[in-house]
Image (cartoon, coloured by chain):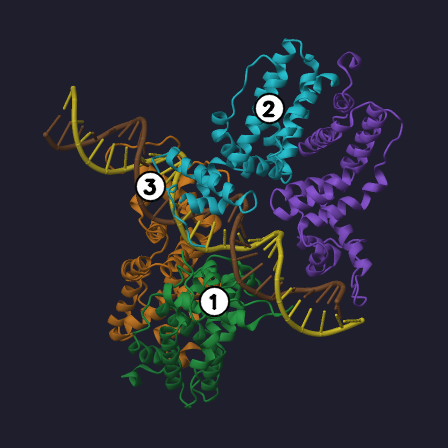
Chain colours: A orange, B green, C cyan, D purple, E yellow, F brown
Amino acid sequence: MITTPNAVSARKRTSIGSRRNPEAEAAVLAAARELISEKGYAGFSVEEVARRAGAGKTTIYRWYPTKADLFIAIYTMERSTFVTVPDVGNLVEELVQYTTSLWRFWSSHPAGAALKGLIAEAQGTEEALGALRDKFLPDRTADLRHILTSGAARGEIRLEEVDDKVSLWVGFSWFKLLIGELHDEDAIARVMMQIAGVPRHVQS
Amino acid sequence: MITTPNAVSARKRTSIGSRRNPEAEAAVLAAARELISEKGYAGFSVEEVARRAGAGKTTIYRWYPTKADLFIAIYTMERSTFVTVPDVGNLVEELVQYTTSLWRFWSSHPAGAALKGLIAEAQGTEEALGALRDKFLPDRTADLRHILTSGAARGEIRLEEVDDKVSLWVGFSWFKLLIGELHDEDAIARVMMQIAGVPRHVQS
Amino acid sequence: MITTPNAVSARKRTSIGSRRNPEAEAAVLAAARELISEKGYAGFSVEEVARRAGAGKTTIYRWYPTKADLFIAIYTMERSTFVTVPDVGNLVEELVQYTTSLWRFWSSHPAGAALKGLIAEAQGTEEALGALRDKFLPDRTADLRHILTSGAARGEIRLEEVDDKVSLWVGFSWFKLLIGELHDEDAIARVMMQIAGVPRHVQS
Amino acid sequence: MITTPNAVSARKRTSIGSRRNPEAEAAVLAAARELISEKGYAGFSVEEVARRAGAGKTTIYRWYPTKADLFIAIYTMERSTFVTVPDVGNLVEELVQYTTSLWRFWSSHPAGAALKGLIAEAQGTEEALGALRDKFLPDRTADLRHILTSGAARGEIRLEEVDDKVSLWVGFSWFKLLIGELHDEDAIARVMMQIAGVPRHVQS
DNA sequence: TTCTAAGCGAGACGGTACGTCTTGTCTTGAG
DNA sequence: CTCAAGACAAGACGTACCGTCTCGCTTAGAA
């Protein structure tokens, strides 16, 4: 495999003293992002990232001791930019908007592949599982939890249900992500009503 | 690495002519089962399975061209024996029983690890994804679909909702499996009510 | 196969930075030497060399992209030490001494097996053939050529004959090596006279 | 690799009872011949021969316990047809003609590759070496020996020299074969004079 | 200023696994 | 007893990554 030098990899980068070189960090992340969007989770390797970024493997391992950390970093890179939290005062509507924007984010950015990689990685090592469950999940579901809690405050659902609804929502979205059915956006509206607990006769 | 001979590996097995040797097949499956329950998805390799089973790698690849196929085989080995489909005439109750028995199956047998491995593998290769989505999933959700369809026949839910409820249920269960929270059996009852769509005031 | 640790394999060797570790190189060569003298050309595998040397296969392939290169390295390791170029001012005498010392070298060191391996390997792959013909042969026949050229300078043979005599000599020596008749040292004197072109009546 | 079925492989051949089926034998030899001329010594495998010939591997191993035996069979198949023993009453001339015809035979038929394979194989196993030295060589040098003996009878060389000259001749020819220089036919005349021992002043 | 501490690229190192290939043995079932 | 077919154990092939290590360089800030 020939190293594909590109705009990203500023060649002949070097140390800028006894602290991190943000250029190097950016190059690594960009290369990782590029690689995972090109080849997916398979075909993603630290070796190749280093090659493309023109970085030493050590440099990468210094910042991201685990592949999971790297995936999280790729994921986090852009998430906040693209996914917005709607505030329309209606639970189902908010869930639908939020889910739709997230699924589109997963589809259109390396983020989807990165999350798949993170989940897959978590099945392999205990640390990765910990990172996923205890660090990634709480952070990434904060918005969702906020939406649900607001709904509860408005009386649309009960507060005790929030946790379970989070699990349901995450499970459903991951499932669609993992089996590659993010294109099925029609399901979103139907399932969000279900999760929000809208009575049957209203759902027609 | 010294080969660890064990009960499983009937030594000095050989060909029984121009068709499969069931002994060899059994030894391979047993070794695979054992290995995945010991070391999990990481640390599972065809190489090691062959070593333990006293089988040639070719033999394994002959039957299971993909790791995914092997995971499915391990999973299928015992599933039917352990997971039974309840028939009590009440949707929530049936879902709770079914889910509980499945979660316990995942927890107590290599099956859980095998399924995690299958899902992880599916993130890596296109074939594995196909096997998971188009072969494994339809088969393995048939029982669930039956439970839901029966409930619809009794008028507990509407028939059009079945597909989405299957997705919700699978998503939820996979999620708990993937983040290692199968021990949280209390959630089952609450979430099954939610999935079944039992009105809020009844859920108390 | 249980790894047989031996004197050769300095355990727990590691990198010494971004350049070759001569210790590792030595261990590989020693293991290869040992292996070929033990098991011959068949039974020589990079895998086993790596095992014995306590080296990664990659390490070996890094230096010796082809088995042929490895054979050449083994051969070259000691050749110069053991085979000396005589200088007695008489062509036949020099050829006899040189041939005898070379045959004994082939008999008593892994070198013989290595050369046989190199020749056999060259029948299999084009690169090996190239290495043998264009790299190995010219180098290794330089001494012989020198002996013959000196003889020509003294008028014992004609200069135009040197190339053919080299071919004759190499052919004869390889032949004896390849069919395992290096013990037949009596033939040396007779054949060297023939190659040198000593008239028949003198040969009695 | 896709099996290339061809005219050679009589499909759906079967046993003709309790003795060898000459059709099968022919198919095996033809396939072997074809294979070695196509891919050379490397890329020659019993497996592939069986595939092409539509023969069972067992069948091949029954007749040719060693690869060497198979090579000899391929070689012998055509040798007698193509190489003729000249009889012109002049040693050098006979040697030149004989050598030329043999080199051309090696170049233009699978025979050359087969002989290279046989020699290479002989470096690997003791049986192959035995077959080469004790069975193949005496047979195949009978003609040459006859030529030389006749020359001795005519007084051109001495009878005691025959053995050494055979070695010289075989060594030289093998050498040219093994390093792939059979095209160098000019060398033949010069070297045959040398082997025949024609005095220098005549060689001009 | 000089020294120290860390970051950085490069890439060698011992390993492990991959999926393919070949070897020589074995058995069946048909003839 | 022969044959085609092909399963089987074994293990080598050459490639790809893993995560660790050391080198030799660069720079910033502490002494």
Q: Which quadrant would residue D135 be assigned to in this image?
A: top right
Residue B98 against residue C38 in the figure, above or below: below
Amino acid residing under circle 3: Thr
Instruction: Compute the Cα span from label 2 to label 1.
Output: 57 Å
Asked if marks 1 and 3 fall on the same chain, the answer is no
Q: Label 2's element?
A: helix
Residue drawn at x 53%, y 72% as measured from the top left? B23
Q: Which quadrant would residue B179 be assigned to in this image?
A: bottom left
Residue drawn at x 75%, y 51% as measured from the top left? D31
Q: Nearer the viewer, residue B100 or C131?
A: C131
Q: Position of residue C179 (x, y in %)?
A: 65, 38
Q: Position of residue D96 (x, y in %)?
A: 81, 26
Q: Chain of mark 3?
A: A
Can residue C142 be seen in this snapshot? no
Residue A58: which disc?
Answer: 3
Residue at the top extreme, as displayed: C154
Q: Nearer the viewer, residue D10 or C114?
A: C114
Q: Chain of mark 2?
A: C
Residue named by callout 1:
B71
Amino acid residing under circle 2: Pro
Q: Position of residue B80 (x, y in %)?
A: 47, 80
Residue named by callout 2:
C138
